[in-house]
Image (cartoon, rainbow, N blue to C red):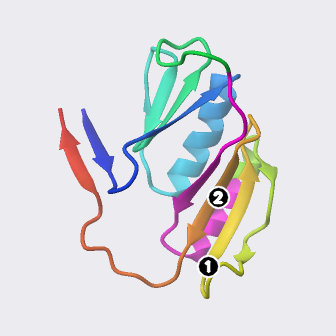
C-alpha cells in the first residue's frame, strides 16, 4: 500500500449517508484530477489524504456532522472545468460555476455540493512550480 501526503494535512475524513453515491461522485472528480481512489470492503474509500466513510463504518464514530469545504488542486483551468462537469454528471449540484474569483489574481475555481451537501472546490491558483509532487509513504 502506498499513500501520498502533503505538508499541512495528514488526512480528512468525510462521513456520508450513502457510500455508493459518494463513491460514484468522488471517483468521477478524482479521475479528472488524476488522483487514484482505493476502495475497501470496510465501508470506506481513500483518495490520497481524503477518506470517505459510511456512517456505520468502523472508522466512523459519533454523529454525522455539518457541512464541510474541501478544495482540491487542479493543474490548469481546463481541469477545473472538467471537474465541474464530472461532478454535476455524478450527483453533484452547482455551488459556483467555473470562473475567476476575487481571492487573489489568477484564482480560478469551481464549487459543487457533493451528495451530502459538502462544498467541494477545484482550484487552479495560477502558474507555480512544485519542489516535489508529493510525499510518498510506503507500508
Quadrant the N terminus occupies: top left
Judging from the image, what secondary structure is the residue with disc 1 in?
A: loop
* 73 magenta-colored: yes
Residue 26, position as x, y percentages in the image: 59, 41
- Asked if one can make out residue 79 in the rendered structure from this viewpoint, the answer is no
Judging from the image, what secondary structure is the residue with disc 2 in?
A: strand
Q: Could you tell me which residue is drawn at 73 percent across and 76 percent down?
A: 99
Residue 124, position as x, y percentages in the image: 55, 73
Residue bearing mark 2: 121
Q: Is residue 76 above or below residue 65?
A: below
* 49 magenta-colored: no
Q: From the viewer's perspective, tell me whether residue 128 is left or right of residue 16.
A: left
- Specify the quadrant of the image occupied by residue 116: top right
Q: In this view, does 73 lie above or below 1?
A: below
Callout 1: few (<14), some (14-19), or many (20+) C-alpha neighbours within 10 Å? some
Which sits in the foreground, 68 or 132? Answer: 68
Q: What stretch is highlighted in magenta?
A: 64-86
- Specify the quadrant of the image occupied by residue 106: bottom right
Q: Could you tell me which residue is drawn at 74 percent across and 53 percent down?
A: 112
Q: From the viewer's perspective, tell me whether residue 7 is left or right of residue 74.
A: left
Residue bearing mark 1: 107
- Asked if one can make out residue 64 in the rendered structure from this viewpoint, the answer is yes
Q: From the viewer's perspective, tell me whether residue 130 is left or right of residue 55.
A: left
Q: Could you tell me which residue is drawn at 52 percent across and 82 percent down?
A: 126
- If you read the primary sequence from the N terminus, does the residue marked by circle 2 or circle 1 appear first? 1
Q: Is residue 48 above or below residue 126?
A: above
Amino acid at each position: 500500500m502506498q499513500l501520498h501526503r502533503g505538508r499541512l494535512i495528514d488526512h480528512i475524513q468525510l462521513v456520508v449517508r450513502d457510500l455508493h453515491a459518494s463513491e460514484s461522485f468522488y471517483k468521477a472528480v478524482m479521475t479528472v484530477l488524476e488522483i487514484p481512489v482505493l476502495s475497501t470492503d470496510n465501508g470506506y474509500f481513500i483518495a490520497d489524504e481524503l477518506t470517505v466513510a459510511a456512517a456505520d463504518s468502523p472508522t466512523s464514530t459519533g454523529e454525522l456532522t455539518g457541512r464541510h469545504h474541501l478544495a482540491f488542486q487542479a493543474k490548469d483551468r481546463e481541469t477545473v472545468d472538467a471537474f465541474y462537469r464530472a461532478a454535476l454528471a455524478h450527483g453533484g449540484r452547482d455551488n459556483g460555476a467555473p470562473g475567476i474569483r476575487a481571492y487573489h489574481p489568477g484564482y480560478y475555481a469551481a464549487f459543487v455540493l457533493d451528495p451530502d451537501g459538502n462544498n467541494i472546490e477545484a482550484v487552479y491558483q495560477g502558474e507555480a512550480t512544485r519542489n516535489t509532487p508529493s510525499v510518498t509513504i510506503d507500508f
